[in-house]
């Protein structure tokens, strides 16, 4: 069976990156945000050459990294 293109994973990663940006990650968590964007770019490259498994893994990693960036960017409410 041939793997399907990870359209949903790519979309999730893009949304997570955009949410991280909205939370101010480009100022407060630039490293994590850059890493997420790099992983998404890799996923897009994998996708363009039909490497769906790699693309899926990179997209999932990009999403996780973007979520981390968003968390880091949010002001801490704990004392």
Image (cartoon, rainbow, N blue to C red):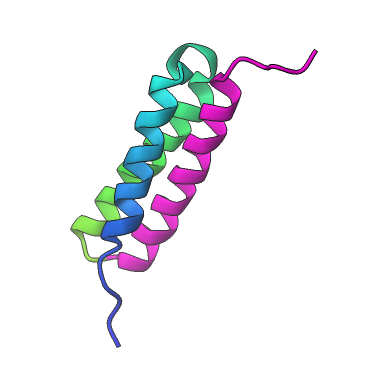
Q: In front here: 22 or 60?
A: 22
- Up the image or down, 33 lies above or below 58; here it is above
Tell whether position 46 is magenta: no
Residue extending farthest to the bottom is 1
Q: What stretch is highlighted in magenta?
A: 51-79
Q: At x 52% / y 44%, what residue is drawn?
A: 64
Where residue 55 sits: x, y (%)? 34, 58
| Quadrant where the image shows the N terminus | bottom left
- The answer to if 71 sits in the magenta stretch is yes
The image position of residue 2, as x and y in percent, is 27, 82
Tell which of 12 and 78 is nearer to you: 78
Most extreme residue toward the right is 79
Residue at image coords 76%, 18%: 78
Q: How many marks?
A: 0
How would you classify the magenta stretch by its main secondary structure? Answer: helix
Pick whichever, 16 or 1, lies toward us.
16
Residue ID at (39%, 51%): 59
Q: Relative to 17, does residue 4 appear above or below in the rendering?
A: below
For residue 3, what is the image quadrant?
Answer: bottom left
Q: Where is residue 52 in the image (x, y as percent from the top left)?
A: 31, 66
The reply, left or right, for residue 59 in relation to residue 45 is right
Q: Quadrant of the C terminus?
A: top right
């Amino acid at each position: 069976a041939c793997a399907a293109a990870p359209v949903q994973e790519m979309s999730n990663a893009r949304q997570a990156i955009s949410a991280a940006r909205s939370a101010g990650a480009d100022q407060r968590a630039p490293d994590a945000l850059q890493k997420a964007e790099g992983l998404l770019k890799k996923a897009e490259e994998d996708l363009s050459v039909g490497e769906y498994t790699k693309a899926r893994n990179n997209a999932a990693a990009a999403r996780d990294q973007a979520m981390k960036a968003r968390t880091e960017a949010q002001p801490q409410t704990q004392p």
